[in-house]
Image (spheres, rainbow, N blue to C red):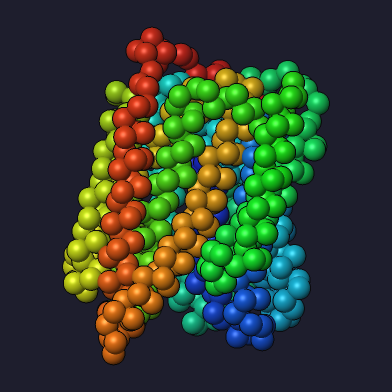
Amino acid sequence: MNEATVKRFAVLTAAAGLSTWAIDMAATQVGLPSMQAALGISVTASQWILNLTLMILAGIVTVGGALGDRLGRLRVFRIGLLIVIAGAAITLVAGLMNTFALVLVGRGLEGLGAALFLPASTALLLDVFPMAERGGAQGKMMMVSMTITAFAPTIVGLVIQSLSWPITYGFTILAAAAALFLQRKVKYEQRMVQQTPFDYVGSALLLLAVSLLIIGIMQAGSQGLTSPTVLLLVGAGLVVGAALVILSLRKAHPLIQFRLFQIRNVSIGVFISLMRFLPNVLMGAFFARYVQQVLGLSPTVAGMLMIVPVLAQVVCAPIAGKMLDKGGPRTPVALGIGLLGVGLVLLAFGFPAQNLWLVTLAAIIGGAGFSFTNPVQMAALSATPLEQRGMLAGILPLAGQFGTALFVALLTAGLGSFMGSYMTANPGASEAAAQAAALGKLAWIGLAATGVTLVTALMLRNPQAAATAKPAPRPASGD
């Protein structure tokens, strides 16, 4: 198999992996109300159908990346997809049987499988493409996966309305099967790192720390940031996390090599991977909430409006990749953060004015901006030593998952606080007006934080021209 074919199928395989996760998340997020009604469970209980998967993914995804370094990325990719297929099949059957406990088992397996194949999806491109072509490869991968992300919720919704929610997990099985088929065409010799003792203690501490923090953050959305339960969970998570850092710094071969963050592009890459989800949450989940609860539009219309920003990401993803290949990460990433800032300014004016066109334009500009920030991950991975590359490929999605949970909780708490202040200052005002005013304030706060992120992005280092001449690995008959 020639080198061009290997590269083409590597992009398709990586895109199929990301698309599998996007379809699975769409099936869960869109189907959650139907699941609650069919299974006869409370709203709080139904949230665990989603949260359990995210918690397992966030806690194990770094382990999945490290295993790719040790066992081979394609092998771990296959194992992860097979686990996802098993989990989705269990969820499907459990849904038909209306068995809540079995649904949670299936969802837990889906989170475990995703933690294995997601890091491999991105790191795979670094194995196959030389530095001068990685941005373009990432752009093509994101273009395919984001196209599917744009339309998956609508298709899932139609299936739920016409058939039933368990059937939607059949799409997850089909997507994972397609990814397994495509990866068979990717044949190359991965440069394996020297085998070292696996850090079981570090893996357990990471899972415990992430679980405590995420559960605490999720509880903050309903109980408030100062709730004793929230403070206890978050405090315990921070203590366990501190123990992880201390023990890792004393080990020769830890799960997470924290000294890696001394590399500028790595530390900046992780920071931006976290912070870019602050405007993304405002322009995504809170935008959808706004158009329904404030503007009174239907969920169907809200879903259709959400497609447009994702299409902006589809259009801009390959452009961002070409900019990365041509001049390095600093320009596209700074441009992306700047566009996110512009979107937040429009939200800050559009939310209080209850102007649909202004907030939709903000979401479109923000979607484009988010795509231009994607090269920061490839820049961080390219600056990472080979033996730590898979580990970092796990940390980057961990930052995204943690950032989403963190900012949803913080923004929800802030929304409640600002709405209360507005209602006190304006007796008789409607909740819609209070929410619109509160979201406007949150947009200004988000803009201030995004300004800090922009300054950080300008500190990214562009690679030396000589580094772009590194050849790609040779195609081979095995993986």
Q: Position of residue 199 (x, y in %)?
A: 77, 33
Where is residue 212? Give x, y as percent.
Answer: 68, 55
Residue 44 occupies which quadrant of the picture?
A: bottom right
In this view, 445 is above or below 426: above
**Residue drawn at x 59%, y 79% as measured from the top left:** 43
- Could you say which quadrant of the image residue 225 lies in? bottom right
Q: Position of residue 150 (x, y in %)?
A: 39, 60
Quadrant of the rendered image containing residue 463: top left
For the C terminus, which image quadrant?
Answer: top right
Q: Residue at the location (33% across, 55% down)? A: 445
Q: In this view, does 365 lie to the left or right of 2?
A: left
Would residue 461 be found to the left or right of residue 49 on screen? left
Q: Is residue 422 above or below residue 263?
A: below
State the residue lying farthest toward the bottom: 428
Number of marks in picture: 0
Q: Which residue is drawn at 74% across and 43% down?
A: 205
Q: Can residue 262 be seen here?
A: yes
Above or below, 203 relative to 447 = above
**Residue 237 x, y percent position in the rendering:** 67, 50
Query: Quarter of the image containing the N terminus?
Result: top right
Query: Looking at the image, which is closer to me, 404 or 142?
Result: 404
Specify whether residue 312 is in view: no
Against 354, residue 207 (above or below) is above
